[in-house]
Image (tube, rainbow, N blue to C red):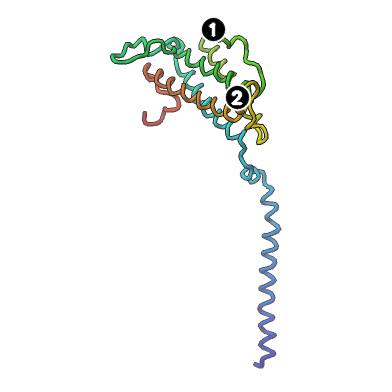
Amino acid sequence: MNRTRVVLLLAVLIFPVLGVRAGTMSAAVGARPAAASRPELQAQQTAPTVASVLDGEISAVEKEIVGAAEAMPEDKYNFSPEILKIPGSEYKGVRTFAGQVKHVAIANYFIWAPITGEPVPESLKGDNGAENVKSKAEIIKLLKDSFALGHKAAASLTNENMLQNAEHSKSTRLRLAMFGVAHAYDHYGQMVEYLRMNGIVPPASRGQSN
């Protein structure tokens, strides 16, 4: 077989293969935009924002605290460790369970309202704030309403305003939003102890090693 025939034979074998590869690559490239347009992939590609991250943190602590508030029987809402008279302890004057829950709710309003620019309800101001909120149902409603304000505050945060001072505050909007979460967790820890002192496992700990 002479050299010319060898070259022609190689050309016949190679070019169809290259054509198949090119067609496969073109099909793959053409398929990419369609795959990228799928809603689930677009959702995965959505980058988190400061607002969405903080909203998630507020949801997390809200779930813990509301769960704890709902777990305590109403007849134990006036419980405080002081009545146990534990030897060597010092619980004189500490808040009752109801006081803990109400404190979180009232603090949420005072911490997050400056971010949204809404006024704190007059009934929550002063040393006796929310004094007319007494039943378990009323206290839990106040608590849930306060977290609703927190979600609204988080949603209002943008890259442009989060480092600006909130209305009538020396703190930035971002710091207030974060502090509300930290403060709530502080009192959640105390609520957990109150539950356990009454033989109640906190909902967040159920199903786990207690």
Q: In 3D space, how far apart are the residues under numbered discs 1 and 2 (Cα atoms)?
A: 29 Å
Quadrant of res 112:
top right
Mark 1: amino acid: Glu
Considering every residue shown, the one lying at the far top of the view is 132
> 90 or 35: nearer the eye?
90
- Local SS, label 2: loop
Q: Nearer the viewer, residue 210 or 98?
A: 98
Give how far across and how far down residue 133 sits, in percent. 55, 9
Placement of 3 over or under 101, stated as above or below? below
Q: How many marks?
A: 2
Alpha-carbon neighbours of circle 2 within 10 Å: few (<14), some, or many (≥20)?
few
The label number, if any, that marks residue 5 in the structure image: none
Q: Residue at x 67, y 21 (%)?
A: 117
Picture disc at residue 170: 2
For the point 58% across and 26% down, which residue is it? 176
Mark 1 vs mark 2: give the one in front: 2
Q: Label 2 near label 1: C-beta < 8 Å?
A: no
- Amino acid type, callout 2: Lys
How many residues crowd mark 1 within 10 Å: few (<14), some (14–19), many (20+)?
A: few
Q: Position of residue 192 (x, y in %)?
A: 42, 22
* First of labels 1, 2 by sequence position: 1
Q: Quadrant of the N terminus?
A: bottom right
**Point 67% across, 50% down: residue:** 36
Task: State whether residue 78 is above or below residue 203.
Answer: above
46 is higher (above) or lower (below) than 170: below
Label 1 sits on residue? 131
Which is nearer the eye, 202 or 164?
Answer: 164
